[in-house]
Image: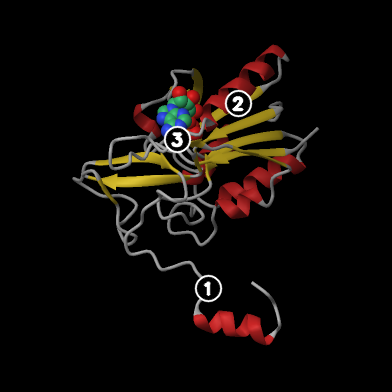
Amino acid sequence: MAHLTVITGPMFSGKSTELIRQIRREQIAEKEMQLFKFSEDSRYAPAEKLASYDGGMIQAVPVINTREMINLVLPDTQLVVIDEVQFFDDIIIDYVSHLVEQGKRVMAAGLNLDFRGEPFPFGHGSTRTMADLLVRADFIVKLSAVCTYRGEVGERCGREATRTQRLVSGNPAHYTDPVKLIGAQESYEARCVRHHIVPGRACPLPTRLTMKMYEKNSVTL
Ligand code: ADP
Ligand code: MG
């Protein structure tokens, strides 16, 4: 049956591993399948691997945008698999829906949140985010990683990590830092909500004003 499955969660949560596991099952079922992954420049890497951090690998076609993918999807394909879907342009949302309407199955994996903890925006400054893809999904696989924050005496947190911490030269990236930093040493860690640190982020707590509005409408917080 045609449907859209989205596998989502922070970095290191096992999205690509789950995708590879599902692909291997479909290979046994001998389904006509095409695998794509986002790549900044596909001209120099005609056949890339869809890889996971634990060493799993499978052949996938790197594409730079949705249009390139549209030109490659064959009429007989039953299942379209996409990794790093959050890096595509927002046409991917409509194209994926179109594929499902055509009777194909789509399995897409991608980050739900950016390093700020906000819905991951699709490419080219789009106002549409991964949230727009997730609401269209028939099935969602939500994964979490392990929080690798270390406390004062070096002990590891180990809680469920639902966020991706961005570090620039070992320090938490500022809220206003561009998503691409040139020349900086950057890295990422999986973190729980408590240890997800974003200097410059506005306080998400309800303000006095909204609290007053709740009181007026006799809503108990
Ligand atoms: P994703 O595609 O979601 O970024 P992968 O499937 O590539 O994740 O990698 C998942 C693997 O990463 C895990 O199976 C584990 O071996 C490894 N890993 C490294 N750091 C962590 C972490 N903090 N929490 C969980 N797994 C981690
Ligand atoms: Mg991955």
For the residues labelled 1 and 2, the Cα–Cα distance comes to: 46 Å
Q: Name the residue under label 2.
A: 34
Quarter occupied by residue 221: bottom right
Q: From the image, state whether disc 3 or disc 2 is nearer to you.
A: 3
* N-term-proximal mark, 3 vs 2: 2
Q: Identify the residue shown where x is 48% and y is 57%.
A: 118
Percent coordinates x, y for residue 110 in the rendering: 53, 40
Q: Is residue 55 visible?
A: yes
Q: Mark 1 points at which residue?
A: 206
Percent coordinates x, y for residue 192 in the rendering: 46, 45
183 relative position to 7: left or right: left
Q: Identify the residue shown where x is 56% and y is 22%.
A: 20
The type of residue carrying mark 1 is Pro
The type of residue carrying mark 3 is Gly
- Comparing 112 with 91, the one in front is 112
Disc 1 element: loop
Residue 158, disc = 3
Disc 3 element: loop
Residue 79, disc = none
